Each structure stands twice: as structure tokens, then as C-alpha cells.
Image (cartoon, grey):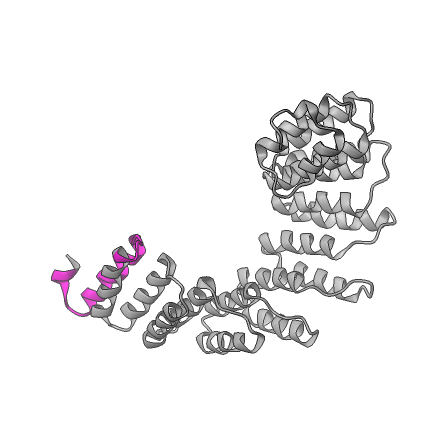
Amino acid sequence: MATSTSLCTKADLLKVLAGRSSSVPQLREALLELRSKKPALPEFRVAASALSRSHLWKDALSVLDDAKRAQIDPDVVVYSASMSACSRAQEWRKALELFSEALGSKLQPNVVLYNSAVNACEKGRRWERAVQLLRDLGSAGLEPSVVTYGSVLSALEKSEQWQRALGLLEEMLSVRSLEPSIIAFNSAISACEKSQQWEMSLWLLSDAASRQLAPSVVTFGAVLSACEKGEQWERALDIFSNMRQYDVIPNVITFNALISAFEKGQQWELALAALSALRSCGLSPDEVTISAALSACEKGGQWERSLALLCGMEKEGLRADVVTFNAAISACNAGRRWELAL
């Protein structure tokens, strides 16, 4: 952007605001200059949307206030953008305040406005309000979108409401006008994982595949974690092996879930094999990885391997926590190497 913004036209300023590569200083400078040119509603829309994308929630709110001071009624675009900016900054209460304000104004609410409100509830873990907004949307004669259902499902997942999540997913799948989404399935699977419903997680994975929905690394990560929590190491191994079938590349999270499943199943050899495979994939283990592998060795009475893993953490730039140290000490005690434990 030119240093002399006073020479810029509205069109120039809007290009800066709409540009995905514009920096925060550029956005704020463009906004400052735009204010001097008596912007109309279209300019306020662009400005609010640009600031929302950049997570500048206070600036987005200032645009909303500018429109009011100019006696221009903000529309659903300006309100929705301002609400989204607040939600991204974890200011979900403010976003819901704006939603109430918008409903009390002259504007005609649409699905996008409701989606912004539901997203705010999801950020604030207010699943009851999210579900109510979904019902209110229907009462207002509007049809929920995939985004609406996805946000409500995410709110239910975060609050460990797995049964409600399954019910809502079933409701969503019954709406013919909506295309099923793997993201929606991911939320339902994660809700089951958090509630230790591993069998239901496996069923959802199978159901998604039957609907020609390609599972992602997030999907597999949630299912593997469910199997780990359910102490189902053999199923975890099968699921991990199936990732190749869908051309899904494992990440550290999926490896961690697999190694943790082996640890709970007292399969130290498989845990170390998985750790080796992780490195072969060009991935770097984190504290969770090493801690799970070390604990697996401790349960298998492999004190030498436990110590080797502990000593190797420093070389990899990892910091051992109390749990990791305790596992190593327990391994030494089990191997009657109490002097090493000291």
C-alpha cells in the first residue's frame, strides 16, 4: 500500500481491505483513511469482513459503531462478520450480545447470522444455547445448513454430549437437501471418544465410509483415541493399518494414540515398533509419544529400554514430566535396579 493513503480512492482502499495478503498495519491504515471518505454500507461490509478474517475483533466492532454513527443500519453481513471476529478472539459473549442486538433491529436475519451465533456458542461450550438456536432457526422459517449442524455438533462434542450428538447427526443425515459431511462425523466420533464409547466410534467410521465419505487424519485420530481409552489395542492396530486404504498419512497424534493403546494393552514391543515407524515417516516424537512408549516398557519390565527412552528425550529437545520419571523409576525398581532409580 502507498504511504500516502490520502491519495487513494475508495476502490484502492477496498482492494487493500479485501486483499488476503494485507498486513494488520495496512488494514488499519486503510480503515482509517476509509473513514474520512464517508463510507456507505458496501464499504462497511468489506471492512468488517476483512477485519474478521484477521481476527481484529475490536476493529470490527468499531466498524459496526461507525455505521451506526453514520446513521447507516448495519446489515447481516456486517453483524455476522463482527460476531465471527469476536468468536475467533474467544469473545463469544460479545458475539451473542451482537446477535441479540441484530434480532432487535430492522434487519431480516438469515442462516449466516444464525451460524455466527451458533459458532459463538460452540466457542463458549454452550451446547444448550446452540441447540436452541438451531430450533429457533427453523421456527424463523430458515433451513439449517451443513455449517449450522457442524457447529452444533462441535458444541455437543466439546461438552461430551455423545448421545445428543448422535441424535443430531441422524437428524442432519435425514435432511435430503444437505450433503453429509465428514466434518460432522468427526465431531460425533470425537464426542463418543471423549465419553469412552469406542464401539460407537467404530460404527460411525464404518457408516461414514458406507456413505462414500473419505475419513481424514482427524477422523482416524479420534477413532484411535477411542480404542485407546477402551483398551482395544488390536482394534487400534487394525484401524491404523486401514489408513493406507484411504491414502491418509498418519501424524504424531495418530501415532500417539496407537502407542498409548499398546501401552494400555501391555504390548511394549509393538509400542517400540510404532515409535520406530513414526521416525521412519519423518515425524518427530513429542513428550506424549515417549511417555507412552516408556510406560509400555515399564509395564513389560524393560527397565533398560525405559532408561534409554528417558535419556534420549534430552537429545530430542523434549522435557520429561513427573509421570515419565515415575514410569522410569518403576521400571528400575521392577528390574531390581534401585541404584539407577536413585
Splitting the image into 4 quarters, where does residue 8 fall?
A: top right
Splitting the image into 4 quarters, where does residue 129 fall?
A: top right
* Image height of 255 relative to 81, above or below: below
Q: Residue at x 19, y 65 (%)?
A: 332
* Image height of 17 relative to 277, above or below: above
- Residue extending farthest left: 339
Magenta segment: does it hold 266?
Answer: no
Start-end of magenta stretch: 315-340
Whether residue 99 is visible here, answered yes or no, is: no
Q: Residue at x 44, y 70 (%)?
A: 258
Rendered location of residue 126, percent (x, y): 64, 45
The residue closer to the viewer here, 60 or 119, is 60
Quarter of the picture holding the N terminus: top right
Whether residue 107 is visible here, answered yes or no, is: yes
The residue closer to the viewer here, 330 or 151, is 151
Quarter of the picture holding the C terminus: bottom left
Rendered location of residue 29, percent (x, y): 63, 27
Left or right placement of residue 34 versus residue 233 in this view: right
Q: Main secondary structure of the magenta part?
A: helix
Magenta segment: does it hold 321?
Answer: yes
Q: Residue at x 61, y 45 (%)?
A: 123
Splitting the image into 4 quarters, where does residue 71 fall?
A: top right
Rendered location of residue 33, percent (x, y): 68, 24
Rendered location of residue 122, percent (x, y): 64, 47
Left or right placement of residue 66 versus residue 89 in this view: right
Q: How many marks?
A: 0
